[in-house]
Amino acid sequence: MNRMTDYMKKKVVSACLGIAAETFPSSIYLAAYTTATSDQGAGTEVTGEGYARQKVTFNAPVINTEQALSTNITDVEFATAQTAWGTVTHIALMDAITGGNMLYHGAVATPKTIEVGDRLRILPGDLKVYQK
């Protein structure tokens, strides 16, 4: 995912230019969406029983073909769906386990319909965050 939200763009520029002493979250959470996300933080987050954002741990970014790239270092595994969640089409990185702010977002490569008893899982290295 390479779409930084407007919220995050302002934080980065403010911090880099010394405009404000910005703080950044110590934990990042992955959220799943059933509609398109946007730079303004829009989208419909999954709300089915058993759903909760999941903490993600990333490796240190490396420069790869003129972009900074970081990937998840462990599985990101959501709980078993107790109700149908719908079709997950987008994901986002959030700065809080509930509420909070969207930092990065993007479409999933292959949308996945989550039915009762299904689990949404992202293997190590499959969640890519990059910035040119």
Image (cartoon, grey):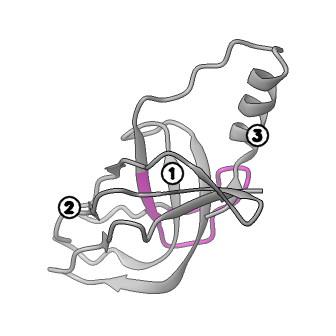
- Tell which circle, 3 or 2, labels the residue nearer the N-terminal end: 3
Q: Mark 1 points at which residue?
A: 93
| Residue under the image location 33 percent in, 74 percent down | 85
| Residue under the image location 43 percent in, 49 percent down | 58
- Tell which circle, 1 or 3, labels the residue nearer the N-terminal end: 3
On residue 103, the disc is none
Residue 107: percent from the left, percent from the top?
A: 59, 74
Which quadrant is home to the N terminus? bottom right
**102 or 25, nearer to the observer:** 25
**30 or 50, nearer to the observer:** 30
Q: Based on the displayed image, in which of its 4 quarters is residue 113 positioned?
A: bottom left
Which quadrant is home to the C terminus? bottom right
Q: Mark 2 points at which residue?
A: 50
**Helix, strand or loop at mark 3:** helix
Label 2 CA crowd tier, 10 Å (few <14, some 14–19, many 20+): some
Which residue type carries mark 2?
Answer: Gly
**2 or 60, nearer to the observer:** 60
Q: Mark 3 points at which residue?
A: 9
**Helix, strand or loop at mark 2:** loop
Q: Does the magenta stretch include residue 116?
A: no
Q: Predominant secondary structure in magenta?
A: loop
Please give the range of residues in magenta: 30-44
| Residue under the image location 43 percent in, 57 percent down | 31
Left or right for 70, reference 114: right
**Helix, strand or loop at mark 1:** strand
Which residue type carries mark 3?
Answer: Lys
